[in-house]
């Protein structure tokens, strides 16, 4: 890995001298960028926000990911199911629900 990288197809006079390790890192970063771009094309910002809001419902580690603001935002994605008046009530209800769930997990 500490040897110098020698390109196969290009003229060796015009290339910058880099080590094999640096070349591999460059290839890795380029591949990650391509995959990230592909994911961004498949999942627009709204879908990503929806997924992040749903992730708050995970009961893992006693609801460590719980975030009532994201859950209220999740309810806003469904205006037919939740009226603006209904969105005001859940804040206290969500805290009570999580407290109840955490206590029931501890006793299980």
Image (tube, rainbow, N blue to C red):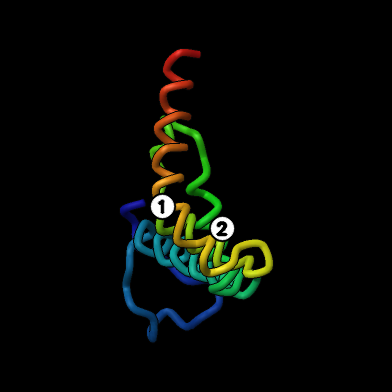
Secondary structure under tag 1 reads helix
Of label 2 and label 1, which has the lower sequence position? 2
Q: Looking at the image, which is closer to me, 94 or 20?
A: 94
- Mark number displayed over residue 20: none
For residue 99, what is the image quadrant? top left
Q: Residue at coordinates 50% horizontally, 62% vertically from top-left?
A: 87
Image x and y of residue 73, in percent? 49, 63
Left or right side of 52 for 96: left
- Against 12, residue 47 (above or below) is above
Q: Residue at coordinates 33% horizontally, 78% vertically from top-left?
A: 16
Local crowd size for mark 1, using a 10 Å CA cut-off: few (<14), some (14–19), many (≥20): few
For residue 5, what is the image quadrant? bottom left
- Against 46, residue 10 (above or below) is below
Q: Looking at the image, which is closer to me, 103 or 46?
A: 103
Left or right side of 43 for 98: left
Mark 2 lies on residue: 51
Mark 1 lies on residue: 91
Q: Residue at coordinates 31% horizontally, 53% vertically from top-left?
A: 2
């Amino acid at each position: 890995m500490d040897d110098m990288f020698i390109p196969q197809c290009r003229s060796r006079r015009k290339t910058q001298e880099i080590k094999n390790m640096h070349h591999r890192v460059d290839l890795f970063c380029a591949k990650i960028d391509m995959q990230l771009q592909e994911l961004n094309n498949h999942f627009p910002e709204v879908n990503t926000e929806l997924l992040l809001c749903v992730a708050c419902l995970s009961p893992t580690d006693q609801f460590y990911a719980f975030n009532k603001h994201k859950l209220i935002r999740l309810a806003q994605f469904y205006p037919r199911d939740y009226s603006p008046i209904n969105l005001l009530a859940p804040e206290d209800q969500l805290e009570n629900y999580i407290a109840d769930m955490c206590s029931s997990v501890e006793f299980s």
